[in-house]
Image: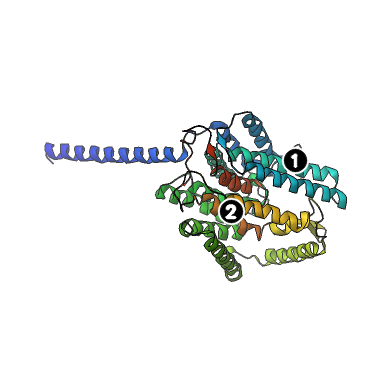
Amino acid sequence: MSLPDTQEQKSSAEERLSRFTAALGQEAKILAEGTGSLVMVEVITGAFLVTMGVPFFGFPMGLIFLVVLTFLRISKPSRFDVPNRSLFVAVLLVGLTYVAITSLNVGISTPDDVGRRLARISILIAVLLLIADRRIDFRSLILGLAIGLVGNALAFYAGIAPDNYSGALTGWLNDKNVSGLHYGIIPILMFGLFPKRSHRIITLLVFLPMLWETGSRTSMAGLLIGVLWILFAQKANIVVKFGLGAFVAWLFEWLQTNYADNPIFGDRAGSDQLRARIDEASWEKVSSAPWSGWGMGQATVNIQDHRFFFHNSYWTLLVEGGIIWLALVAGLTLLAVFMWKQHGIVKGQRVLTAEAATVFLAICSWRLGEVMLTLPWVFAVGLALSLTARPKKQGAEKNFVVT
């Protein structure tokens, strides 16, 4: 080989390396534009939200981190006005007061149980409102939770995080359904942070195997339908979206009916029989409840001396506060996510991230008991309200980008 040939090959290798470095730099730039300026307090808090299943002085450890974040951000002046915030808060507070009074009047739930549940819901609502007016940096919080979920999976398979569900990925979340809920909703929310297709594909490639390992068929179906919503619901008006919602409900039932017993999910016969018994007992309790419900904390049944939570979040709302409580929570969610006007968008081009996340939650609510008024619900509704927020000063929203 001659010296000129060697120099030519060296020059070609340097050019390829230069092109690769430039492409890598461009990817990093797009990634940075997607996440914006990260706030480390939110990133750290988000990472520790995976400890929601770890008790700490009677409360979930992750909730303690949210309390600290709330106190840090509540004194921060807001640069945004949320047009319907007062209405949202007023209706929700009236509903909570009604359910609390009902709980105490019925007398099944103890005052301590009612107070503890009210405290937990109040913390979550405070976080929701701080996300809505953007005092909590949503992107940093979600990216932190994504990192925490990956860390939770690594710790689980390393034998560090607990395994309480026969090998299903739970870790510090400590519940199979809660785990499926988190590993399912985060990819949808991440779609709003990363506008480039390749980054979205990477997000799915990272989270789909982890979601599969949770064994939550409902969350898998919910993620599939949430992604379909992002792809096909953009130009649909509210009437068409209701029609699409009906199709989604049918598709979910079809998937449950035709693929629930598929061998790829393993032998679930015993688990499904237990779930059927829980559902039967749950519906019996819902049917026997007065119109105002049985009160907070009553969405449980006893099967062979074991206490189980309902596997239907709509029934949970019904049994705790009756049809009024269900209509109030579902109605507020519908208004905030699908109907209230988003600020600064091209006419007819709504941001679909919050909608898709809510569709995911609506699907999961049909098979999981703790979905509404939980942290994933806070993410979806808080994001939806933040998209209606208007800056008090021009330029306040330059770093907030959700697609």
Q: Is residue 273 visible?
A: yes
Query: Residue 127, percent across and down?
Result: 64, 39
Secondary element at image label 2:
helix
Residue 203: image x %, image y %?
47, 48
Q: Earlier in the sequence, mark 2 or mark 1?
A: 1
Q: Residue at x 80, y 47 (%)?
A: 100
Note whether residue 311 is visible. no
Q: Is residue 382 above or below residue 177?
A: above
Q: Say if 333 sits above or below 12 in the image.
A: below
Tag 2 residue: 358
Q: Are marks 2 and 1 in contact (CB under 8 Å)?
A: no
Residue 278 percent location from the top left of the image: 75, 63
Which label sits on residue 107?
none
Residue sitting nearer the eye, 358 or 116? 358
Count of picture labels: 2
Q: Nearer the viewer, residue 28 or 193?
A: 193
Decide: few, some or many residues near mark 2? Use Cα within 10 Å; few <14, some 14-19, many ≥20. many
How many residues crowd around disc 1 within 10 Å: few (fewer than 14), some, or many (20 or more)?
Answer: few
Q: Quadrant of the N terminus?
A: top left
The residue located at (85%, 46%) in the rendering is 110
The amino acid on which the numbered mark 2 sits, given as a three-letter code, is Thr
Identify the residue at horizontal 59%, vertical 57% (top origin): 219
Query: Where on the picture, by quarter, is residue 42?
Result: top right
Disc ID at residue 119? 1
Q: Amino acid at mark 1?
A: Ala
Asked if residue 62 lies left or right of residue 119, the reply is left
Where residue 53 sits in the image (x, y, percent)?
68, 44
